[in-house]
Image (spheres, rainbow, N blue to C red):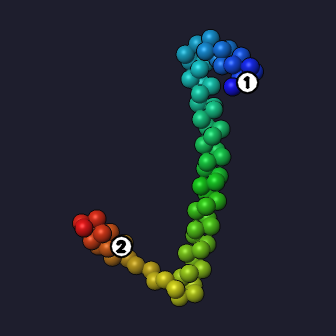
Amino acid sequence: MSNHFKEIESTILKLSEKERAHLASLLLHSLDDKADKKSERLWLKEIDYRNQQFEAGKIDLVTEDELRKRAKKVLDK
């Protein structure tokens, strides 16, 4: 790790517990935002793909009950 990082780390560890908790929350949220955006982008891509497959007649929709029955069969094996 760089000297700059080590200096920052040393300074952070001198903060109060409350200050470190606040900083940790800020850092985690900064990571979550990037992950959330990537996840959202991937889900939108998947939704678009599934919609195209449905509209092309390549897949059929099933009811929630049917989905549960199929899942139970797979899980019971």
Disc 2: which residue: 67
Circle 2 residues within 10 Å: few <14, some 14–19, many ≥20:
few
Question: Within the image, what quadrant is residue 50 found in?
Answer: bottom right
Disc with the residue nearer the chain's start (1 vs 2): 1
Does the rendering let one see residue 5?
A: yes
Q: Are marks 1 and 2 in contact (CB under 8 Å)?
A: no
Instruction: Please tell me whether mark 1 or mark 2 is closer to you in this view.
Output: 1
x then y, percent, for residue 62: 40, 79
| Mark pair 1, 2: CA separation | 53 Å
Identify whether 66 is placed above or below 46. below
Residue lying at the far right in this picture: please name it.
4
Residue drawn 62% across the image and 25% down it: 23
Disc 1: which residue: 2
Does the rendering let one see residue 65?
A: no
Mark carried by residue 57: none
Residue drawn 58% across the image and 68% down it: 46
Query: In the shown orientation, is residue 70 left or right of residue 13?
Result: left
x then y, percent, for residue 29: 61, 37
Q: Secondary structure at mark 2?
A: helix
**Closest to the observer: 19 or 3?**
3
- The kind of residue tagged 2 is Leu
Residue drawn 59% across the image and 27% down it: 24
Identify whether 20 is placed above or below 55. above
Identify whether 14 is placed above or below 31. above
Residue drawn 65% across the image and 52% down it: 37
x then y, percent, for residue 73: 27, 71
Quarter placement of the N terminus? top right
- The kind of residue tagged 1 is Ser
Residue lying at the far bottom in this picture: please name it.
57
